[in-house]
């Protein structure tokens, strides 16, 4: 999903601040914007908000309030999500990699054995009750 849970705080000056958890305390994420689309940002102050990143606009986009959490994600989690976004690995890439891996000689015997086992386990034909 590539999302991050932040603590959102609206500063007295109207600034929208995103915080992460870092070594037991909150850490301000400098120079980060957040978009709430049509919502009033002040209604989210003090809440943990889950956000995804909009690469085109360069801002975090509010997804939902995390009522099940009372702390934001760790700073290291944030860094991992950023790296995942930069890597931009799609479902198609993952499926292609899996297909390439199962064709490796070290897996060829296993794939063949599994294929035979599936063929042997075919369910018996259904009777029509006559």
Image: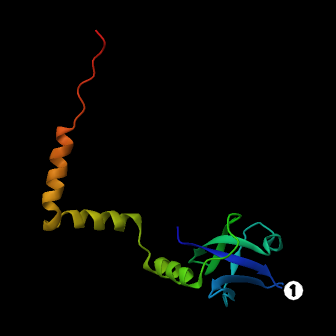
Give the secondary structure at mark 1: loop
Q: Is residue 46 left or right of residue 53?
A: right
In this view, the residue farthest toward the front is 24
The image shows residue 25 at horizontal and vertical percentages of: 68, 87
Between 27 and 44, the residue placed more toward the observer is 27
The image shows residue 28 at horizontal and vertical percentages of: 69, 88
Between 70 and 57, the residue placed more toward the observer is 70
* Residue to which mark 1 is pinned: 12
Q: Residue at coordinates 31% horizontally, 12% vertically from top-left?
A: 129
In this view, the residue farthest toward the right is 12
The image shows residue 56 at horizontal and vertical percentages of: 57, 77
Q: Residue at coordinates 52% horizontally, 81% vertically from top-left?
A: 82
Q: Quadrant of residue 93?
A: bottom left
Q: Quadrant of residue 88?
A: bottom left
Q: Is residue 98 above or below residue 27?
A: above
The image shows residue 37 at horizontal and vertical percentages of: 72, 68
Between 90 and 73, the residue placed more toward the observer is 73
Q: Is residue 96 left or right of residue 18?
A: left
Q: Residue at coordinates 48% horizontally, 82% vertically from top-left?
A: 83
Q: Residue at coordinates 69% horizontally, 83% vertically from top-left?
A: 19
């Amino acid at each position: 999903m590539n999302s991050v849970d932040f603590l959102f705080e609206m500063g007295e000056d109207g600034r929208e601040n995103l915080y992460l958890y870092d070594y037991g305390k909150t850490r301000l994420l400098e120079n980060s914007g957040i978009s709430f689309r049509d919502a009033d940002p002040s209604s989210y102050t003090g809440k943990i908000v889950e956000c995804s990143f909009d690469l085109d606009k360069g801002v975090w986009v509010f997804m939902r309030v995390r009522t099940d959490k009372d702390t934001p994600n760790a700073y290291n989690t944030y860094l991992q999500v950023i790296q995942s976004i930069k890597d931009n690995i799609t479902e198609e890439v993952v499926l292609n990699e899996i297909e390439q891996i199962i064709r490796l000689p070290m897996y060829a015997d296993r794939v063949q054995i599994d294929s035979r086992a599936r063929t042997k386990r075919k369910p018996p034909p259904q009777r029509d009750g006559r």
